Image (cartoon, helix red, strand yellow):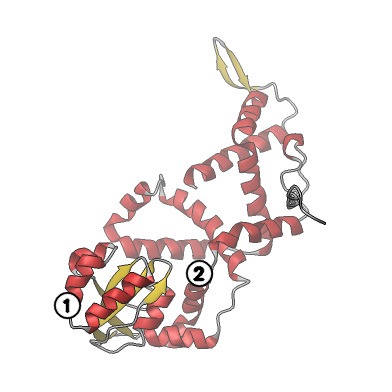
Amino acid sequence: MKKFAIVALVTAGVLTLSACSGDDSEAVVETSAGDITKEDFYEELKDRYGEEVLRELVTVKVLEDKYEVSDEMIEEEIETAKEQFGENFDMVLQQSGFQSEEDYADVLYLSLLQEQALAEDIEVTDEEIEQHYDRSKIEIDAQHILVADEETANEVKEKLDDGEDFGELAAEYSTDGSAQDEGNLGYFSAGSMVPEFEDAVFNMEVDEISEPVQSEYGFHIIKVNDIRDVEDVEELEDVKEDIRRELQIAKMDMSQAATKIDSLLQEADVNVKISEFEDMFEPVEPEEPEESEGAEG
């Protein structure tokens, strides 16, 4: 994403130069072997990155027309990341492929625009917000055993019911990294786990062991070891919008992101003036299924 954003910025500058100058033969690089003209530079960038960069530029323009991302919003995201990673912030940026904080801010801008586009179709009720807030007042210490299928989960649950040790079974059966620590997950708060896991664990008592709980990762059997209160919880009204956003993000189906963006592009009636790309925003008609030979009408 980072590299792509840089290419977009460079190409945007070239497109502007090309459009504003009547002399595309003007040299942008001179060598003893010959010159590189604006037209040479523009055509090479267009051939290599043209469609991808043009799509990003148009997408940003369309999103900017409907949604707004302020400098304050970006700064808040960066400060949150700095609080999360502390002195490792710069190292995490580099490991993620960002050359600088400004580079990261450019990508955050597009990300926040896309988030707003997806969020407008997602409803979060006051009841959901209040439930999340109530859960945020406690932290839970738990273990789990994660297995791939329901049959194995039922087998493990039967052994637990017969009195076998939870930690030993986690070490034997669990398919995730917590198996090395007898399934221990430590203390966690609301929003840290997948919804199915969270709904189960926040309705359990200390020392209770759950029935198998299915999530996208497989089947969990959960044991609650401790429940403790969180100190200095903010008032609901002070965090309500933060909770709303958190729940919206949790509900987002990223597989539908492209469909949402495409619909916004279609609404914008995009008219591409570059001949090579003039059809790039045309809707793709679904292919008719081929009739099987010998099929009766």
Q: Is residue 55 visible?
A: yes
The residue furthest right is 297
- Residue 191 percent across, percent down from the top left: 40, 75
Q: Which element is circle 2 on?
A: helix
Task: Say above or below: 14 vs 279.
Answer: above
Residue appearing at x 56%, y 60% in the figure: 255
- Give left or right: position of 10 versus 174: right
Residue appearing at x 19%, y 67% in the figure: 181
The amino acid on which the numbered mark 1 sits, given as a three-letter code, is Asp
Q: Mark 1, residues whose alpha carbon is within 10 Å: few (<14), some, or many (≥20)?
A: few
The answer to which quarter of the image holds residue 114 is: bottom right
Q: Is residue 141 visible?
A: no
Residue appearing at x 65%, y 46% in the figure: 55
- Give left or right: position of 216 versus 267: left
- Residue 129 percent across, percent down from the top left: 49, 84
**Which residue in the structure is indicated by mark 1?**
165
The amino acid on which the numbered mark 2 sits, given as a three-letter code, is Ile
Q: CA distance from mark 2 to mark 1?
A: 37 Å
**Which residue in the structure is indicated by mark 2?**
249
Instruction: Name which of mark 2 and mark 1 comes first in the sequence.
Output: 1
